Image: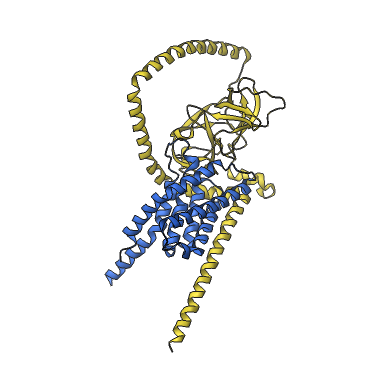
Amino acid sequence: MAERPRQIFRVEASIRTLAQRFLYLGLVGAAFALMLLGKADVLLVERMRAHVTDAVAPILDFASRPIASAKEMINEVRAMTALKSENERLLQERARLLQWQAVARKLEAENKALKSLLNFKSSAATNFLTARVIADAGGAFAHSIVLNIGKRDGVKNGQAVITGDGLVGRVAVVGNRSTRVLLITDLNSRIPVLVESTRTRAILAGNNADQPKLIHLPPNARVPQGDRIVTSGHAGVFPPGIPIGVVASVGDKGIAVQPFAERNSLEYIRVINYDQEGVLGGLEESEYQQLTVPGQAR
Amino acid sequence: MKTAFWQRLDLWARQLTPFGLTLALVVLSVVPLHIPGFARVAPLLALMAVYYWSVFYPSLLPAYAVFAIGVLQDCLAGTALGVNALVLLVTYGIVLSQRRFLVGKSFFIVWLGFAIVAALAMAVSWALVSILSVTLIDAEALIFQYLLTLGLYPVMCWFFLRWQQAFLNTE
């Protein structure tokens, strides 16, 4: 009589392990399905990502504050110790910048006079949104940061993100109260640029390393080391002339650019609202569908 | 009746902590630390947590919880959706199949086990991301990330052990 309950128990246990194994394999399958879905329907997956980031954004906003203020405190202590030498440096810099100011004033007046001669129309007006960086997504595979502003603050897909130093990246995914910014070092980042001194056009391509590379240069183009790289404004996504970085090395492995904006010091950044309909800028969801499925638009 | 209900609720809440803790670690791992060069080689906290709990308390971390942790990490870190979910599930599967070699062994054996499993997990994620983006990804940052993850494991292990003693071993 004692045999039967044990047998039942054994059968039940084996059914349970079988069910667990099926669940495990099913979940592995689901992970693969998610990857395929990410390739097939980018919009859906990005919207899902935006929702999840939105949900976590308040926690991130809260958690990133103590670290930011600790960093500020360290900086303050460091500044106190270097007060005298800093003052001297600033006085020298001020003298130099006053000369630059005189030059800039003269050029501005000259520029204005020449523009009025030519009836020149300046490019579209820009305004800024300031935001705090609440997440710096780590890892070797994707370079992106998350900001604490979103659709309700007027952020749109494709807008340029800058610091005082230079270009940081572009808005990739906009949630309601969070925004994901694709950094210029990310593998998927491609930005039309100009070599400032020679006006050579190129594309700045990220490669998941610290220094993105210049590609698609015209044949026989010469790019001297130390030249500044700025946005070209082609394709209408970014305003022209935003500084990006300097040419760090020219070699067999390509032309590497050292960006001005340092990733670890990103704390407050600005999103440029550049009112121009580009390839990414004003594209709304319905238009996207019209582009992909022209027959079903009506 | 009432005490039994509260006891059960208490037990249930305690048993949920490994999952909750791992989710919290995923969120914490993307908070900007402002350390130069750190973001690229940030240690994989979720991988450590999934390894630890699946070695010592697999019943409290079911496969669907591992999947959910992976999807959250994918969403926050900006990697292709499904990559981390698969990598963590593979880790979980390997650990469960080799569990009898790890349970009851010294800390160094468990650490060695983590070194092997983490290397496999990172190789899988490197291969997946490379295939999905159709380029060979520079593995330099990945190696540093691996070493940092390995070096931080004892610290996290101590933390998880404390957590386990505080919330789970009360009977």
Residue A195 appears anywhere in the view:
yes
Residue A89 screen position, x and y as percent = 40, 17
List x then y, in percent, for residue B3: 27, 69
Q: Position of residue B143 (x, y in %)?
A: 53, 44
Q: Nearer the viewer, residue A38 or A155?
A: A38
Instruction: Write down the quadrant of residue A76 in the picture.
Output: top left
In this rendered view, identify the residue nearer to me: A122 or B132: B132
Query: Which quarter of the image is occupied by the N terminus of chain A?
Result: bottom left
- As drawn, the chain in blue is B
The answer to whether residue A174 is seen in the rendering is: no
Chain A is shown in which shade?
A: yellow
Position above or below: B161 against A244:
below
Name the residue rendered at 38%, 58% in the picture: B17
Seen as rendered, the residue at the extreme right is A219
Would residue A250 appear left or right of A6 to someone viewing this image? right
Q: Quadrant of residue B137?
A: top right
Q: Residue furthest bottom?
A: A1
Rendered image quadrant of residue A78: top left
Residue A226 place in picture, x, y as percent: 58, 22
Q: Nearer the viewer, residue A290 or A73?
A: A73
Whether residue B164 is situated above or below residue A73 in the rendered picture: below
